[in-house]
Structure formats: C-alpha cells, structure tokens
Image: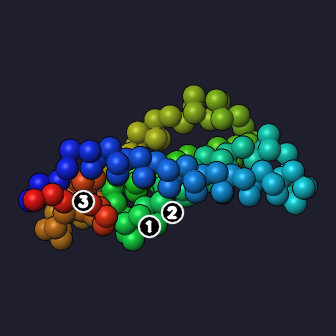
Amino acid sequence: MEYTDGRDSRLRKRSLLIVLGFMFILNGIFFSLSNIGFLGMTVRKFWPVVVINTGLSFFAADFFIYRRLRSVFFFPSVFLFILGIIFLLFSTDVFHVSFRKFISVFWPIVLVVFGVILIATYGVKRKTGEEFPYMQDDSAEDSFSEKTV
C-alpha cells in the first residue's frame, strides 16, 4: 500500500488550520481581557503573551490532531513558550535591566546552557540505551491518513 501524493500537503494544511485556530482563540481571549481592563496593564507590557499563546497553540493542535506530542510540534512549541516567558519577564520589569543589555553581557551563558542540555541528552540516551523522547522523525505519521491500493 502507498500513500497518496497529496497526503503531506493536506496534512500540513490541516495542521496549519488547527494551529492558527488555536492561536486566534487564545490571542482573542487575551486581547479581550486586556481591552476590558481585566489584566490591569496594556498590551504593550503583555505582548509576549502572544508568543506564549503561539507555543501553546502548537501543543493544543498536536493533541487535537494526533492525541499525543510529536517532535514536529513539540520543539517549536517549547521554544516559543520559553522565549515568550523570557520576553515577558523583561517587558514587565521583573528584571531591572534592558533585554539588549542583558543579552550583550550574558550571551555566553546561553551557550553554556545549550551545551549542558546537549550533554544531558546524550547522557540520558547512553544510560537508558533507548532513543531520547521526541528524537525520532514522526512527521509523516497521522491518524487520518488516506491509503490507496
């Protein structure tokens, strides 16, 4: 049995529609709460919530479509979520230094953290003897594929 040629493009379109749908819902709720004054701050301070909502949209879309987390959605969603949290900490003045100044001084720490994560991933893989979760390519898997004979 072979998959149809248009299967990948249909899957991408469906996934994109679900991600965009969740993004519009989450960001619409956020902007509505901001406009009615429920948040007590302007969107100018809370703009990173849009980035966080985008990361959450990837999580939600993956669960909605596949009923599990897949690497195709997992890594972008975690990256956007963490990036949004970092931006939110700076835009709400939790850190009393500008983001530009912080990065210009502490950028080597980002390299160290990334290196530690890579070494820890290798250590877990070596100790367990199994593939690290989300490291295999599962982008072609779906639960609603169409097959032809």
Dot 2 crowding, Cα within 10 Å, few <14, some 14–19, many 20+: many
Q: Name the residue under label 3.
A: 146
Horizontal and vertical percent for residue 61?
48, 60
Query: Residue at coordinates 57% horizontally, 28% vertically from top-left?
Result: 104
**Label 1 element class:** helix
Residue that mark 1 sits on: 63
Q: Nearer the viewer, residue 23 or 100?
A: 23
CA distance for labels 2 and 3: 23 Å
Q: Closest to the observer: 16 or 37?
A: 16
**Vertically, is 33 above or below 115?**
below
**For this rendering, which residue is in front, 49 or 88?**
49
Instruction: Look at label 1 and name its amino acid.
Output: Phe
Q: Type of residue at label 2?
A: Ala
Give the Cα distance between marks 2 and 1.
Answer: 5 Å
Q: Which of marks 2 and 3 is in front?
A: 3
Residue at 46% in and 66% down: 64
Locate the C terminus by quadrant: bottom left
C-alpha gap between disc 3 and disc 1:
20 Å
Q: Name the residue under label 2.
A: 60
Residue 24: x, y in percent? 64, 51
Please tell me whether mark 3 or mark 1 is closer to you in this view.
3
Instruction: Give me the residue at 50% from left, 34% from top.
Output: 107
